[in-house]
């Protein structure tokens, strides 16, 4: 796929609709795009490559867009293989080309390409450095841990384009026309969610620039209403609430805990909660469950006890939340156990390892199946989840 971003900037990326799992863990039913760009000025710069899976298609796009010209630079903003997979092909074809990257990225190159001698073939840049292509001047800003330590972003002050690396990316191939926020949110919290402070630092740098267009490494080029996208990134990276309501995540073995979760959802809706989402952690997409935990105002977890611990799908979910720095939320706890309920103790201990988590009481214990005698405790928990924060 080739199209013009501006008069002298071309999109030369590719869609991958055959991929089932991004990073071998995130379901991508609508595929993923590997974005790459070409700046055609007095000097020519390739802005990142793509995954080797789509290297042949990308090479055709590059060759067509070059129209016989030779590139002078390959700007490497991120060394992850889905963006740096074709570096070796480029420098073998164009031996006089210079790789422009952060010092840390340059140190990483031999990790991925051991048979290539990069001596004299790289140009290390640091915060604020500039590269003149002719009319266009590229300026580089370091963005460590968004979401690898070597990451940088690039700003073209002439066309006011920000090449944002993985920032502002989303799941889904460009051939699918869909709302940006849903898959961008799932992408953000599962890929960059741990690094809110680093994203905030990058947003402060972006705020000082005059940006008309954002070109990420995944997902569509963003042109209109940039304040909307930047505002969502600001909310997400501050771990603030995006949607008022409650998310219920449950892990049920034989269906008893599932019925408790469904009853709790009905209670909350009856009490006026504007939005209640429910996820079956044994069957639903884990990445989406993580996304919704961050998105929603409050969280209720319900799980069966299992081997003196908690049912593994819940343990996996809470482990994901910890990895992604879940914080600043009120959490309700429901446990189930036929003879020795212990899930609540385990879940509370896992939440205690997270930042600014308030456990809402009462903690509800169910014995095998929900009974009429359990309803008062469930009502009490539902009421407590509605209490405003001080």
Image (spheres, rainbow, N blue to C red):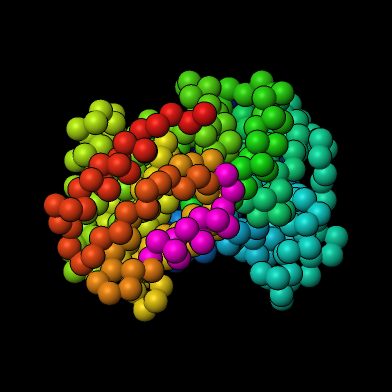
Whether residue 318 is visible here, answered yes or no, is: yes
Quarter of the image with the N terminus is: top left
Residue 86 percent location from the top left of the image? 59, 61
Quarter of the image where one finds residue 316: bottom left
Residue in the picture at 63% in, 40% down: 199
Relative horizontal placement of residue 312, taking residue 137 as reference (left or right):
left
Task: In the rendered view, tell whether residue 152 sits above or below residue 316.
Answer: above
In the displayed structure, 292 sits above or below 349; it is above
Name which quarter of the figure residue 117 lies in. Answer: bottom right
Q: Is residue 10 magenta?
A: no
For this orientation, the residue located farthest to the bottom is 307
Residue stretch rendered in magenta on the structure: 343-356
Q: How many marks?
A: 0
Looking at this view, is 346 or 367 the one in front? 367
Residue 240 percent coordinates (x, y): 52, 34
Residue 227 is left or right of residue 332, and the answer is: right
Counting from the top left corner in percent of width and height, residue 274 is at 28, 29
Examine the structure image and report whether residue 352 is included in the region drawn in magenta. yes
Question: Which residue: 81% across, 35% down?
Answer: 128
| Residue 375: % across, % down | 20, 48
Dominant SS of magenta comes to: helix
Q: Quadrant of residue 113?
A: bottom right
Q: Answer whether residue 214 is visible to the viewer in this image.
A: no
Q: Is residue 254 above or below residue 77?
A: below
Nearer to us in this view, 17 or 290: 290
What residue sits 85% from the left and 60% below the top? 120
Q: Is residue 100 left or right of residue 179?
A: right
Name which residue lies at 58% across and 36% down: 238
On screen, residue 94 above or below 185: below
């Amino acid at each position: 796929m080739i199209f013009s971003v501006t008069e002298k900037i071309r999109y030369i990326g590719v869609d991958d609709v055959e991929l089932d799992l991004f990073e071998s863990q995130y379901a991508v039913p609508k595929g993923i795009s590997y974005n790459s760009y070409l700046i055609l000025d007095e000097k020519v710069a390739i802005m990142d490559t793509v995954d080797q899976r789509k290297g042949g298609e990308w090479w055709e796009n590059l060759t067509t867009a070059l129209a016989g010209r030779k590139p002078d630079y390959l700007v490497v903003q991120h060394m992850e293989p889905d963006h740096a997979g074709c570096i070796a092909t480029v420098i073998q074809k164009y031996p006089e080309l210079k790789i422009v990257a952060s010092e840390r990225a340059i140190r990483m190159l031999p990790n991925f390409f051991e048979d290539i001698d990069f001596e004299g073939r790289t140009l290390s840049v640091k915060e604020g450095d500039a590269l003149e292509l002719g009319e266009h001047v590229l300026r580089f800003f370091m963005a460590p841990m968004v979401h690898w330590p070597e990451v940088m972003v690039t700003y073209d002050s002439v066309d006011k384009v920000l090449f944002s690396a993985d920032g502002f990316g989303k799941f889904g191939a460009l051939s699918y026309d869909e709302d940006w926020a849903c898959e961008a949110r799932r992408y953000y919290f599962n890929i960059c969610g741990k690094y809110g402070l680093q994203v905030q630092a990058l947003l402060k740098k972006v705020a000082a620039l005059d940006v008309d267009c954002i070109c990420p490494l995944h997902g569509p080029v963003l042109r209109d209403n940039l304040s909307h996208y930047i505002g969502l990134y600001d909310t997400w990276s501050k771990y603030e609430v995006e949607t008022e309501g409650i998310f219920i995540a449950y892990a049920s073995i034989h269906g008893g805990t599932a019925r408790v979760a469904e009853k709790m959802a009905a209670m909350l809706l009856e009490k006026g909660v504007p939005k209640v989402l429910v996820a079956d952690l044994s069957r639903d997409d884990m990445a989406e469950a993580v996304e919704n935990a961050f998105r929603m105002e409050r969280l209720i977890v319900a799980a069966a006890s299992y081997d003196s611990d908690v049912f593994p799908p819940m343990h996996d979910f809470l482990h994901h939340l910890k990895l992604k720095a879940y914080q600043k939320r009120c959490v309700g706890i429901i446990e189930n156990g036929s003879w020795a309920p212990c899930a609540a103790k385990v879940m509370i201990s896992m939440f205690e390892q997270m930042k600014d988590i308030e456990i809402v009481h009462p903690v509800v214990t169910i014995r095998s199946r929900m009974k009429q005698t359990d309803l008062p405790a469930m009502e009490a928990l539902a009421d407590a989840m509605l209490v405003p924060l001080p």
